[in-house]
Image (spheres, rainbow, N blue to C red):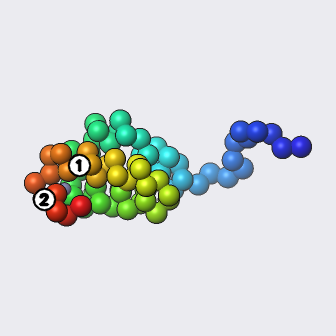
Amino acid sequence: MTTPNAAPSYYDPADVLAEVFDDETLADDLAAYLTCVEANVLAGFLDSTGRHDGAQCWLRAHRVGCNAPHRH
Ligand SMILES: [Zn+2]
């Protein structure tokens, strides 16, 4: 018998990192403080884990104050 919503039997740090940063509110609060490279790396990481909307949130939020938006 399987238990719905059971905790995973392993800890995947990359999955936890992606889950934590797949957050539009966090992106709105922090993206302006990231360098262009940091924003791109984080968005690329989220994209690689299938969190495409989260990746776009970070890029959108970062572009607001970015003086080189063509880099994203
Ligand atoms: Zn930028």
Q: Is mark 2 within 8 Å of ligand 1?
A: yes
State if disc 1 and disc 2 touch (CB < 8 Å): no
The alpha-carbon separation of the residues under discs 2 and 1 comes to: 10 Å
Between disc 2 and disc 1, whose residue precedes?
Answer: 1
Image coords of residue 34 (percent x, y): 23, 50
Q: Quadrant of ligand 1?
A: bottom left
The quarter holding residue 43 reads bottom left
Callout count: 2
Mark 1: which secondary structure?
Answer: helix
Q: Amino acid at mark 2?
A: Ala
The residue located at (40%, 49%) in the rendering is: 54
Residue matched to label 1: 62
Residue 64 is situated, as x and y percent measured from the top left of the image, at 18, 45
- Can residue 57 be spotted in the picture? yes
Q: Amino acid at mark 1?
A: His
Which residue: 80% across, 39% down?
A: 3
Find residue 46 and report its horizontal and vertical position in percent: 43, 56
Residue 33 visible in the picture: no
Task: Judge left or right: residue 39 versus residue 55.
Answer: left
Q: Taking 1 as reference, is 30 left or right?
A: left
Answer few, some or many: residues within 10 Å of disc 1's Cα (few below 14, many 20 plus, some between 14 and 19): many
Residue 33 quadrant: top left
The N terminus: image quadrant? top right
* Residue at the spot of label 2: 68
